[in-house]
Amino acid sequence: MKTVLIISSFVAASQVGANAAAFCLRRLGIEAIVLPTTLMGRHPGWGDPGGGSVEADVLRKMWSAIRQQDIKFDAVLSGYLGQDSHIDLCADIIQEIKRNNKSAFTLIDPVMGDNGALYIPATRAEAIAKTLIPLADMITPNVWELSYLVGQNFSSHKDMIEAARSLAPESLITSAPESHDSHDEIGAIWTNQDSVVQVSHKRFSTVPHGGGDALAATVLGHKLSGLSSITATERAVGSIFAIMKAANAMTSNQSGRRELPLIETQDALINAPHLSSRVINT
């Protein structure tokens, strides 16, 4: 059985961060061990989250105890980091895991902002770009995060792809429109240094928090299960589409946004609806 170390937020009553990632991985038959960068009661989008970030010294002690269990980690998934000091700790852990297992896969989800603005301090975002991105085998930024990481705005998909290729061996660009002027469809663009594919689906007007966390974990889970990156992307995007579609239907019968319905829709993680990919020529 494969094992992943998740370094991300723990939010007790919300399906985001490590909660969402760990569930998706476990549903795919992969063990997930969580190093929680925050301890909160709920997502800040609902109001006062309660709790806060976990001190780096506490996380180091937790990691020291985890390593004494002699666990072989097959991958690291880094998500939301609650303090600037978490970046160096995360880098140290990634490098240690790589020393112990040269084939261990590192996925960096650079959770830092969206819709034109950072929601973490600029110092932390810059440290993620400088210290963690170079360690990644794969990154999963949204379009705005990718733009921030390379310091440029995009006028075409080609610009996005070139930017992603400059940062990591593999990238999954999330919240990517089907075309640069499209407002009806959204999805993800996967690229390595040689190939590019896009998987798109209908855009929803309201989506729950946590979709990016679930997508990153699901792609990683499929890759660790032996699927190609393209197939992993198709299935993962299909799964998240099904989950978001269900969430949208639930929201229409209630008032306002709700949590990501992972438990209710968990079968979609295993039996993803088919979304075909299209090759993008660059």
Image (cartoon, helix red, strand yellow):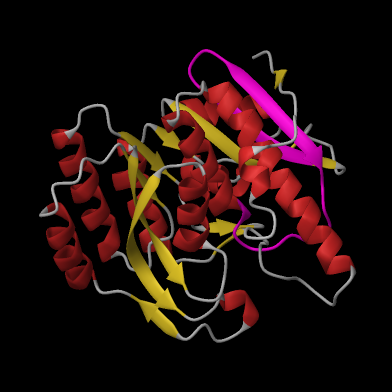
> Magenta residues?
186-211
Residue 160 visible in the shown view: no
Identified at 48% across, 25% down, the residue is: 165
Is 28 inside the magenta-drawn segment? no
Residue 190 horizontal/vertical position (percent): 58, 28
Residue 107 in picture, x, y percent from top left: 40, 40
Can you say whether 206 is above or below 146 in the image?
below
* Residue 196 among magenta residues: yes
Rendering coords of residue 159 (x, y %)? 62, 28
Is residue 2 left or right of 25 when viewed as pictured?
left
Image quadrant holding the N terminus, namely top left
Seen at 34% across and 37% down, the residue is 2
**Who is closer to the viewer here, 137 or 272?**
272
Q: Is residue 55 above or below residue 203?
A: below
Task: Count all numbered tags in the image, as a single digit.
Answer: 0
Residue 45: image quadrant is bottom right
Q: Is residue 77 visible?
A: yes
The residue closer to the viewer here, 268 or 5, is 268
